[in-house]
Image (cartoon, rainbow, N blue to C red):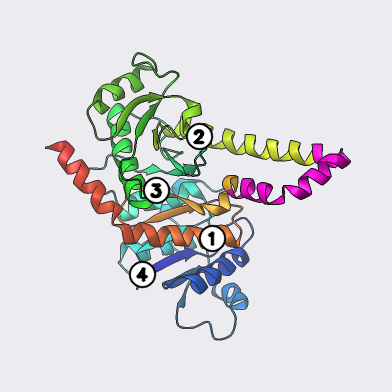
Amino acid sequence: MIKIAIDAMGGDFGPEPIVKGTLEALKAKEFEAILVGKKDEILALLPKGYKGKISIVDADDVIDMGDAATDALKRKESSIYKAMELVRLGEADGVVSAGHSGATMSLATLRLGRLKNVLRPALVTLMPTKNGQRSVLLDAGANVDCKPEHLLQFAIMGHCYAKDMLKIEHPRVGLLANGEEDSKGNEVTKETFALLQGTEGFMGNVEGNNIFDSTCDVIVCDGFIGNLVLKASEGVATTISYFIKQFIRKSPFAITGALLMRKVFARLKKEIDYAEIGGAPLVGIKGCAIVGHGKSNPKAIKNAIFQAIRYVNTGVNEHIEQRLEELNK
């Protein structure tokens, strides 16, 4: 049975939503949960008779959002360090954390190690599109400065992820640039374009709007740009939701219309709600690490766990290694 280590202390709201999300996940799927954190606090949140599919690993230290990511390697009693060690030692198949993302990514890279031939791991985020199928954006923040060979590998890892995790038979891969023409982009993207030509699924340069319009399945960029895209998209979604609520409150006719469109608004909320995804996987590492949002609620934790289980089951890591091995021949 798949075992998932869950950092019970990492989120902004303490262990309560994490434990609740874990319990909800256990009701829906068969797996073993290992909650890592302050044992007394975790036990107080568990119902009687929880034993069987849940075990607890005691960890007194918690890496806060304000702590430096570089401290993570020194703090061996922290919940995220101990959770990561369970994966490294083969006692868990994957780790889920809504805590310090920098600490999670640093520990995953340095303690678990990279897959064979992987130069740098990348953070994957899933973006909503017009046809209901999510697009894959990477890197979403793990690597601020990248070389063309890094972006080439991101394209291959993203292609494997889209094929295995999203079940897209022939993923279309685009390189994010300031225009679709081959000549567009900065020096790094131009060099990357040349490396990507002829690789499976590569369709050329794509623009920011292509992330959402269903013309592309995998969008490749460095972590600096990817994180800006992600945060800007979250800001736009939040602002539009705010405007809709304000306009509805100011008009009796709009209130009536809103009541009639409750199902539409529920669908919209589902498309842009980060909790529906759960977290962002760090691809290119040995094992599985899902980086959750600091404000994760139980639903987000549940879905992050589901994503970790799918990641392990699909064998995406093996497929990434195979593709990179072929590239190096």
Disc 4 from disc 1: Cα separation: 17 Å
Disc 2 from disc 4: Cα separation: 34 Å
From the top left corner, tell me how far across and down residue 3 is, in percent.
38, 69
**Between discs 2 and 4, the one toward the N terminus:** 4
Q: Would you name the residue on which mark 4 appears?
A: 2
Q: Which mark is residue 212?
A: 2
- Quadrant containing the N terminus in the rendered view: bottom left
**Between discs 2 and 1, the one toward the N terminus:** 2
Disc 3 from disc 4: Cα separation: 19 Å
Residues at marks 4 and 1 touching, judged by CB atoms closer than 8 Å = no
From the top left corner, tell me how far across and down residue 172 is, in percent.
34, 35
Q: What kind of residue is marked 3?
A: Leu
| Disc 4 element | loop
Position of 295 with respect to 325 (left or right) is right
Q: Residue at x 62, y 67 (%)?
A: 16
| Disc 2 element | loop
**Between discs 1 and 3, the one toward the N terminus:** 3
Position of 156 with respect to 207 (left or right) is left
When the figure is inspected, residue 321 is found, relative to residue 230, above or below; the finding is below
Q: What kind of residue is marked 1?
A: Ile
Q: What kind of residue is marked 2?
A: Phe
| Disc 1 element | helix
From the top left corner, tell me how far across and down residue 29 is, in percent.
45, 70
Magenta stretch in the rendered image: 247-270
Q: Would you name the residue on which mark 1 appears?
A: 301
- Quadrant containing the C terminus in the rendered view: top left
Q: Which mark is residue 282?
A: 3
Q: What kind of residue is marked 4?
A: Ile
Residues at marks 2 and 1 touching, judged by CB atoms closer than 8 Å = no
